[in-house]
Image (cartoon, rainbow, N blue to C red):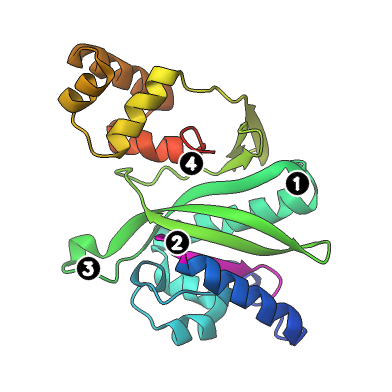
């Protein structure tokens, strides 16, 4: 394990800058249902950590902030720790070297297994979460990573890193070759989008078919086409894919 990854710079930042951003993150976090975590790439600590069970992994807010990046050693599944370091380095290197045309990148998405603060048995010790990380530049330098956490609907870790662009194209990263592969944005049809919106609102196949005035068989075929195209196995996973790629609301 790379020890340098966990060691940050401990010098102080100008108070005005840090206080102003912290207030902004606090206000933004109050409006959101998902935990909002802000990484400080330069100092290798947390610029903002909410008082939320999902992101704190059983620790207190104060303990987490005090640990900085050492928190990851305690919170992330041992099998995923090296993956997280590789993701972290790939994001920073690609943006700093402008491999991805940094000004066009909207956010990155990936999954991690983290400690489950609500676990009641050894079988539920870790929880698979979906993370969206938006890079933020401060004084013309890549400084912060604004992260949104949500429980993943995937059944297992896929060890993938994806970069999402403002025009909704996306790039997949290959950790072996350290190269990005471009994928052109493929929009949903109006009926596909409507079907997913009703599913997002919890409607059954029958209720969705009634809403759209089509047969249940047609709804099933529409779902299966998307499952095959997106390589997912359930409507919940399809909705997460659509959310990650901003296919429903953007």
Q: Residues within 10 Å of mark 2 (few under 14, many from 20)?
A: few
Residue ID at (62%, 31%)? 169
- Label drawn at residue 53: none
- Look at discs 2 and 1 and give the one toward the viewer: 2
Task: Indicate the quadrant containing the C terminus: top left, top right, bottom left or bottom right.
Answer: top right
| SS at badge 3 | loop
Asked whether 226 or 173 is in front, the reply is 226
Which residue is labeled 4 in the image?
244
| Residue indicated by mark 3 | 119
Q: CA–CA distance between discs 3 and 4?
A: 27 Å
Residue 44 in view here: no
Magenta stretch, main secondary structure class: loop
Residue 216 x %, y %: 19, 16
Residue at x-position 60% and y-position 77%? 23
Q: How far, Cα to Cα, is label 2 from label 3?
A: 24 Å
Residue 240 is situated, as x and y percent measured from the top left of the image, at 39, 40
Q: Residue at x 44, y 19 (%)?
A: 190
Other residues around mark 1 within 10 Å, as few (<14) / some (14–19) / many (≥20): some
The location of residue 45, given as percent across then percent down, is: 60, 76
Distance Cα–Cα, label 1 vs label 3: 39 Å
């Amino acid at each position: 394990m790379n020890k340098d990854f966990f060691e940050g710079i401990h010098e102080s930042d100008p108070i005005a800058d840090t206080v102003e951003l912290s207030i902004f993150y606090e206000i933004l976090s109050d409006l959101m249902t998902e935990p909002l975590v802000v990484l400080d790439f330069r100092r290798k600590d947390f610029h903002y950590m909410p008082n939320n069970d999902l992101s704190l992994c059983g620790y207190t807010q104060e303990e987490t902030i005090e640990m900085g990046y050492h928190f990851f050693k305690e919170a992330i599944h041992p099998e995923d720790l090296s993956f997280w370091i590789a993701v972290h380095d790939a994001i920073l290197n690609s943006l700093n070297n402008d491999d991805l045309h940094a000004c066009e990148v909207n956010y990155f998405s990936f999954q991690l297994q983290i400690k489950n603060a609500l676990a009641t048995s050894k079988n539920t010790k870790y929880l698979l979460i979906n993370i969206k990380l938006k890079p933020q530049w401060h004084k013309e330098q890549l400084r912060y990573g604004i992260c949104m956490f949500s429980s993943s609907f995937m059944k297992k870790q896929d060890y993938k890193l994806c970069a999402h662009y403002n025009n909704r194209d996306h790039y997949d990263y290959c950790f072996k070759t350290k190269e990005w592969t471009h994928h052109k944005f493929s929009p949903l049809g109006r009926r596909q989008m409507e079907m997913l919106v009703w599913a997002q609102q919890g409607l059954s196949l029958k209720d969705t078919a009634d809403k759209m005035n089509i047969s249940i068989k047609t709804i099933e075929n529409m779902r299966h086409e998307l499952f095959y195209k997106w390589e997912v196995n359930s409507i919940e996973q399809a909705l997460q894919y659509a959310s990650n790629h901003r296919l429903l609301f953007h």
